[in-house]
Amino acid sequence: MSTQEPTRYPHPGKFEGELALAEWAYQATLDGGSETIGDCSTIGWASSRLDGPFNGDDERAAEEACGPLTDADRAFLRSLAGAIVTETDQGFVSASWYTDKAELEADWLKVEADAAESDDSEE
């Protein structure tokens, strides 16, 4: 029995090359409630952190943003400890997905350090 992969974003542009769920994750960061670091207009990128676990409300929000979810999309979303969503000054969005909370924490510390370093170089 093969395991299905989550759906890939089907169009060129902002979420190109990402999972379709990246559109939901990006929208969730815009809706507030997530920590954001960086600034596209000054350092060229901004990252936001979404903390899981994700539940049925998140699945419904993902379907509103992305369209119908497959069973693989739902299973993937339920398996996550969180995500880091980054937007560049060109408007492209990428998402890093985490099933391990400690790994999410460690990578978020790197994002904070990168932002601090970029802020220092701007002065």
Image (cartoon, helix red, strand yellow):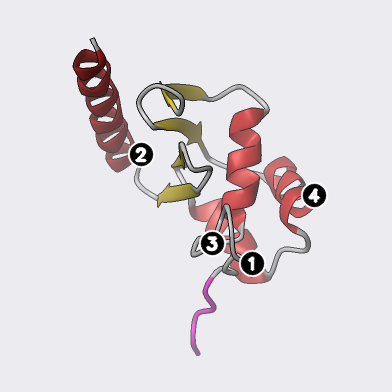
- Residue segment shown in magenta: 1-5
Mark 3–mark 4 Cα distance, whole angstroms, equals 19 Å
Please state the horizontal and vertical placement of residue 43, each as a whole percent of the image. 35, 26
User: Residue 92 lies in magenta, yes or no?
Assistant: no
Amino acid type, mark 1: His
The residue nearer to you, when weighing 57 against 69, is 69
Mark carried by residue 16: 3
Please state the horizontal and vertical placement of residue 63, each as a whole percent of the image. 76, 54
Which-is-in-front pick, marks 1 and 4? Answer: 1
Give the residue at the far bottom of this rendering. 1
Label 2: state its secondary structure.
helix
Q: Are marks 1 and 3 in contact (CB under 8 Å)?
A: yes
- Which residue occupies 71% across, 63% down? 69
Q: Are marks 2 and 4 in contact (CB under 8 Å)?
A: no
- Which residue occupies 70% across, 50% down? 62
Label 1: state its secondary structure.
loop
Mark 2–mark 1 Cα distance, whole angstroms, equals 30 Å
Q: Are marks 2 and 1 in contact (CB under 8 Å)?
A: no
Mark carried by residue 11: 1
Mark carried by residue 115: none
Mark carried by residue 101: 2
Amino acid type, mark 4: Glu
Please state the horizontal and vertical placement of residue 45, each as a whole percent of the image. 40, 33
According to the picture, the residue beneath numbered tag 4 turns out to be 64
* Crowd band around label 2 with a 10 angstrom C-alpha radius: few (<14), some (14–19), many (20+): some
Give the residue at the far top of this rendering. 123
